[in-house]
Image: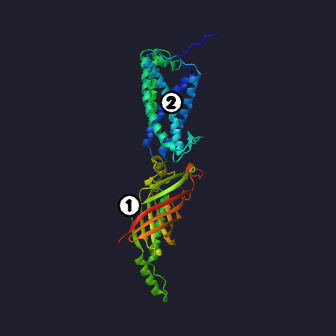
Amino acid sequence: MSASAPPPARYSSAAIFLHWLLAALLLFQLSLGWRLETLANVPQFIAFQLHKSVGIAILLFSLARLGIRLAVPRPAPVAASPALSFLASATHALLYFVMIAGPLTGWIVVSTAPVRVQTLLFGMVPWPHLPLGAGWNKPAEAAHSLIAWLFVGLVVLHVAGALRHHMLRDDVIGRMMPRAVASRRGLTIGAIVALLGGAGALAAAKLWPFSAPPPRTAPQTELTAAVENAAEDILANAAAALPAPVNAANDAQAEAEAGKTAAAATPWRVQAGGKLGFRADYSGMPVEGSFQRWDADIVFDPEDLPGSTISVTIDLASVDSADSERDNMLASDSFFDVAAHPRARFRSSRVTHRGGNAYRAAGTLAFHGQNKPVTLDFTLDIKGDEAKATGSATLSRTAFGVGSGQWASTDDIKDAVAVTFSFTAKRAAR
């Protein structure tokens, strides 16, 4: 039986290539993860997609690197004290843990997020979600963050150990360098280049361009909507100023009813604490949110529905879905396009009674540069000078052009969006 072959003096070419490739990708990924917190709207979304793509690449390359480590002979460990040998082994083991567990926890976070955005590796290859429940999301998110900080500590230990060996002339760095770098001076230059390369990978993520589309200089649709609304006001005021047709037989009765109408409908003031929310369906999962800033002008009386009007103005930038990244995406021009259309407005044209305390307000919603008919169904409980209202409406997001590019399809985000509201109002003094 022949004796086993001695361990090689250097790592294999594949191991060397993957070592330096992973080092660059990991440092770039770490820096990109920190930068995500400073971006918003479309740039943040683009950066997040790149972060996911690089993470999956790190996972695949790390599994390949681990396979080579297990299958291909590697140099023998450098002689050192038991404590240093244990520290070196633990650092290497934890680096493999970070390289694999980091992307895995990120994959879990993406797969279990309330809005599961499709991952396209570098914008080309679809990557599936893991079949896990929403309960995995928070623990995975916490673990992903801790792993990032663990990686920082391991990088410091790993680099310090390599430089220590180089200063002691153990030639450890040479085992992970190309064969052409063999001299002492070559290894020193190689170590400096490696350090500069690591710094360059960190800087690259900070300088990587994530540009949003250029701003629209003339949002004609919003201008058109404003002109149409102004025209409606002018026509309504003009119609009100015109004398009514004379009917001698009914003139006295019409004047009496007009006087009754003018006296009946009264303004109401919405009180703090109300909620205007929405609910959409994304890949079979409900996504809920609300608007923190909105106002309503209400003139209403059950006995004077022809004289009752409802007008609501919504600050779209105040959208809150309990996820800042998703809120930024909703505010971007892929969805609400807040920069061009900062507000949505509903104005009723007719209020009707549906029985009991149920009513319906038909009107027009100006949203995302579009004016479309919308119907609000609501219930109203009036006690003295206080009223409590709850209601809902269903909107077609595609009818208003909300969701462009990859979001235009209704395969992932359904077309119907439910809008709900509840508030308390008090009768204003005349």
Residue 107: tell me if it is visible. Answer: yes
Q: Earlier in the sequence, mark 2 or mark 1?
A: 2
How is the protein colored in the picture? rainbow
Of the pair 81 and 12, the residue shown nearer to us: 81
Q: Position of residue 121 (x, y in %)?
A: 56, 39
Q: Position of residue 116 (x, y in %)?
A: 54, 46
Quick check: 218 above or below 74? below
Judge from the rendering whether residue 282 lies leftward or rightward of residue 322; answer left or right.
right
The quadrant of the rendering that contains the C terminus is: bottom left
Q: Which residue is mark 1?
A: 272
Determine the residue positioned at 54% across, 44% down.
133
Q: Which residue is the extreme one toward the right? A: 1
Q: Amino acid at mark 2?
A: Phe
Quick check: 142 above or below 99? below
Secondary structure state at the residue bearing disc 1 = loop
Quick check: 219 above or below 71? below
Q: Position of residue 81 (x, y in %)?
A: 43, 16
Alpha carbon distance from label 2 to label 1 = 51 Å
Residue 214: tell me if it is visible. Answer: no
The quadrant of the rendering that contains the N terminus is: top right
The crowd level at tag 2 (other Cα within 10 Å; few <14, some 14-19, many 20+) is: some
Label drawn at residue 133? none
Q: Position of residue 149 (x, y in %)?
A: 43, 33
Q: Which residue is mark 2?
A: 97
Of the pair 247 and 418, the residue shown nearer to us: 418
Determine the residue positioned at 38% across, 61% down.
272
Judge from the rendering whether residue 385 lies leftward or rightward of residue 23; answer left or right.
left
